[in-house]
Image: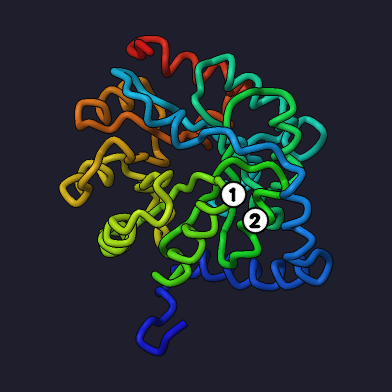
Amino acid sequence: MSEAESQPEMPATLREIVEHKRTEVEAAKSRTTMSDLRARIEDEPEPRGFFEALTVPTSGTRVIAEVKRRSPSAGLIRPEYDSDGFDPSLIAQQYSKAGASAISCLTDEKFFGGDLRFLRQIKEKIDLPVLRKDFMIDPYQVLEARAHGADAILLIAECLTDTQIREMLELSSTLGLSALLEVHSRDNLIRAVAILSDQLNPRTLLGINNRDLTRMVTDLAHTTELLDLVPDRSILVSESGIRTSDDLEHLRSHGVHITLIGEHLMRQPNPGDALAQMLTPTNTQ
């Protein structure tokens, strides 16, 4: 990292997660080297087309449905998720039957109750592409994602310098992975748009997360307020705070046809039924 490029300022919760993630990555490197990961990748099938599945033109909404056990803001999302009642592959199957276009799977263990092994478990049961959702701070994690069967990775601009984003976009492209570059703020959206203009990974989506990381509240209007800064809405994903078919219709009226929906669905007794209810009234895929 150059002297002129400092680490972005992060809200306290995000900073705590990233600091812990650094220790996790170093521990992982001591167990499995990057060379070992590259060797494992040689035996992996080609990634499924995450970017392609979400950018096929539609008058409806393409949904990235999320498998998520807990979060720092919500805690455990449902009581039964504290035990064997949490079955990532079963939830993913429900989403697939309900009309999801892709799956997002939390792999962070400490803060979200995730596991890298969930990626493989899900892919063995469904044909949809799967995003590794984690706090990616090191190229090692990109290799790790590919070696565990991920088809795409999440990069959060608030956690990363421009150089780090560029490096991981280039690496993900060489590995055949799609990417979702997520921003929370206007300033980081401007950064992200400039980086994406260089086409470091042509299979990159741009996400606007509607969660305020300082107050930990969501506001769907955040996406629409920032739309004028987005050159290409066909790759735009609205994330967080999406709960109803009316929310999907509102986003579509502004040209936003891709969403990531997680916590609302995971709060329901059957996440797949909840997704189907959201998609049925107006989705004409």
Is 23 left or right of 36, judged from the image as shown? left
Q: Where is residue 22 in the image (x, y as percent from the top left)?
A: 64, 72
* Element type at mark 1: strand
Rendered position, 76 above or below 85? below
Quadrant containing the C terminus is: top left
Total number of numbered discs in the rendering = 2
Viewed as shown, does residue 36 lie left or right of 111? right
User: Picture coordinates of residue 194 (x, y %)?
Assistant: 27, 61
Neighbor class of circle 1 (other Cα within 10 Å; few <14, some 14-19, many 20+) is: some
- For residue 263, side relative to residue 161 (left or right): right
Contact between labelled residues 2 and 1, with CB atoms less than 8 Å apart: yes
> What residue is shown with label 2?
111
Residue nearest the viewer, comparing 134 with 174: 174
For the point 69% across and 37% down, the residue is 45
Q: Residue at x 61, y 35 (%)?
A: 67
- Dot 1 corresponds to which residue? 71
**Amino acid, disc 2:** Phe
In the drawing, what numbered circle is on residue 14? none
Q: Mark 1 or mark 2, which has the lower sequence index?
A: 1
